[in-house]
Amino acid sequence: MGAVLGAELSLAQDREQAVLDSETQGTVSNSWETITAESEVTSWQVLNKGVLEILDGGAATRVRADGANSWVIVNGGRVTEGIHLGGARAVLDNADIRNDSGEALLLSTVTAAGTTTASRAEIQGSTLSGAGIGIAVAALGQLSLDNTRVFGSDFGGVGGMGIRLLGATLTMTNNSLVQGDAIGLQLDGRTAAPGGPIIPREANIVVDNSTIEGLTGPAISAVETTIANITVQNGANLLSGNGVLLDVAGASTIGFTADNSLLRGDLVADDSSTLDVTLQNGAQLFGNLINTHSVAINSRANWTLTSDAEVNSLSMGGGSVTLGSAEQFYTLSLGELSGTGMFNMHVNLMDNTGDKLDINGEAHGNFLLNVQNTGLEPSSPEITPLHVVHTEGGDALFEVVGGSIDLGVYSYQLEKQGDDWFIVGSGKTISPSTEASLALFNVGPTIWYGELATLRNRMGEIRTSGEGGGWIRSNGNQYNVTAEAGFGYKQRQKGLSFGVDLPVPVSDGQLLVGVMAGHSRSDLSLNRGTSATVNSYSLGAYGTWLRDDGYYLDGVLKLNRFDNQADVSMSNGTKAKGDYDNFAYGASLEFGKHIKLHDDVFVEPYAQLSSVLVKGGSYHLDNGLRADNERTVSVLGKAGATLGRNLELPDGGLLQPYLRVAMAHEFSRNDNTVKVNDTAFDNSLFGTRGELGVGVSAALSTELQLHAEFDYMKGEHIEQPWGVNLGLRYAF
């Protein structure tokens, strides 16, 4: 028969041959034999292009097939003492193959008359369980597993391998499992037949959506000058009992690729071996690469270190490396670095420590440092420069994600000093978390005044008619705010309010009093995608007195409840959230005179004083930042005039277009201090502003009136580019 390359694969091959020779056995030679449920259970030898077929319900004890054109087909049947292929082929479908004293399946390679014939097995939906080794495959053999389970148990204190492979090909697909009591898959570079011809020993392994597991040892072990390429792809998994996914020893050379899979454990090589690792297509590795020769991380793949690590050469093509965590910092030491990628890092500026990238050779390419942003404060805003990247030269460019690093109140910069890179305190700016906190504490007065404008329009109407009634109004506006603290935001407000009022008899003129309720929502837009939302719920009372000589006095009391929510996008894109509730109390008093001119033209000069107190509080973002504010106070004085005309409509209605101009001044300056992580900010909107409004009121009948107004305002710290009010009232 010639040399059999497979003897060293088997832990019990001599015993197998002796048992096979001593048993009563069937022989299939140049024929086709079918085993059914009614057939005798015995051992079989297949020779000379013979085919042994075991159907559902059929069984055999031991099967051996020799020769390139000899076949073993098991379709739903079972074999109780294993199958040995000597250059033959097996097709197993829904088969149950077991052996309590050796391999469930042995694929040998035979060399005779200068011709080498390897075995091949295609297995689908089957279970194979062996003692010592589940399946053994000699050089050049081909084994494919589809939705198949392979188990290798400990055999007298030795073995415990799911599969043992000598320079062969293994393909696993469709949720297959290979499990060994010790090692899931062992790769061996030895030639099995001493003195025989040199057989190429390169193994190729593809694990596709399948699992290899070593219960007490590594998932995969490579020994004795193994040369192999291993690809783990499409959700495949490697599991180990000792934390080592791949153990490379004995002057072996391994190329390992993880593709679109998540792996947890270490890849280890000894000093005599070479291990090259590639992560690609979103693959995730949580573990260490120990004594690796080269590492390539491409196409959204990520390697997360679990301790300090050293790699001779790292190339990146759109992948990333995560060095440590907020609780544990690591150093990644590289011989050289090239490509394009990202390093996820963590720092603690309270004690000036953090992750570090230490390149002891040249670095070439473009790299992002995604330093964890946090709301926690450094020991001092004037930080000691923190060393995060060291190189020995090269043209590499390092930048931080988002252009800066949020650390508490401020955002800090990355600065190159020689061939090294540092996080520095110079050039710091207010962080997005701080901006959101200041904006929420600042927005209460503008919300209150935006709702007040709606009510003031209603009061102008009832002065004109002198009749009580019910009303409903909607309003929308935008404020562009630049606070004293040096940040800005846009506030878009929309709301709905309604109320009812009644006339009260007085000796001079007319007096109406009413109550109102409303809701508004304000959406705040800040820098870099940060936003906030405030829902306002209000109750109020109002009154207006118009004397017979044209003088009038308007008064408003209003209570608000604000629900505040912040959605912060930190500089690196990480989200942080926080919320709190507070109340506001305010009043407004306006005094003026309605002066009738000729041709139904009128003018109303007026002066107004409004004040609102927004209760402060303390709130936290989930990134650790905290903000405190005792109160926010606004005192707004205003003087202006309204010019309008009453136009009678042909059907008896009345149309009143008007123009309003005013100058306003915010007096509150020192009552709006906000502390963010104990850093104080002046949050006032102190200054003067001009206002312009145009509108029209239409009395369609004695009961029904419509109203519309457009407003514009511009000041030192605040601008209202537009404001719209639409209303309807029905007189009783």
Image (cartoon, helix red, strand yellow):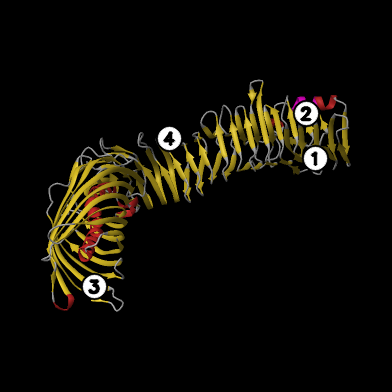
Question: Which residue is label 3 attached to?
Answer: 657
Question: Which residue is label 1 attached to?
Answer: 73
Q: What residue type is labelled 2?
A: Thr
Q: What residue type is labelled 3?
A: Pro
Q: What residue type is labelled 1?
A: Ile
Quarter of the figure with the C terminus: bottom left
* Most foreground residue, 697 or 42: 697
Q: Which of marks 2 and 1 is nearer the N terminus?
A: 1
Distance from Cα at disc 4 to Cα at disc 1: 47 Å
Question: Which residue is label 2 attached to?
Answer: 80
Question: Which residue is label 4 attached to?
Answer: 306
Check disc 3: other Cα within 10 Å, few if <14, some if 14-19, many if 20+.
Answer: some
Quarter of the figure with the N terminus: top right
- The span picked out in magenta is 13-18
**Where residue 208 sits: x, y (%)?**
61, 44
By secondary structure, the bulk of the magenta-drawn segment is best described as: helix
**Where residue 662 sits: x, y (%)?**
15, 65
Query: Is residue 611 at least partly visible in the picture?
Result: yes
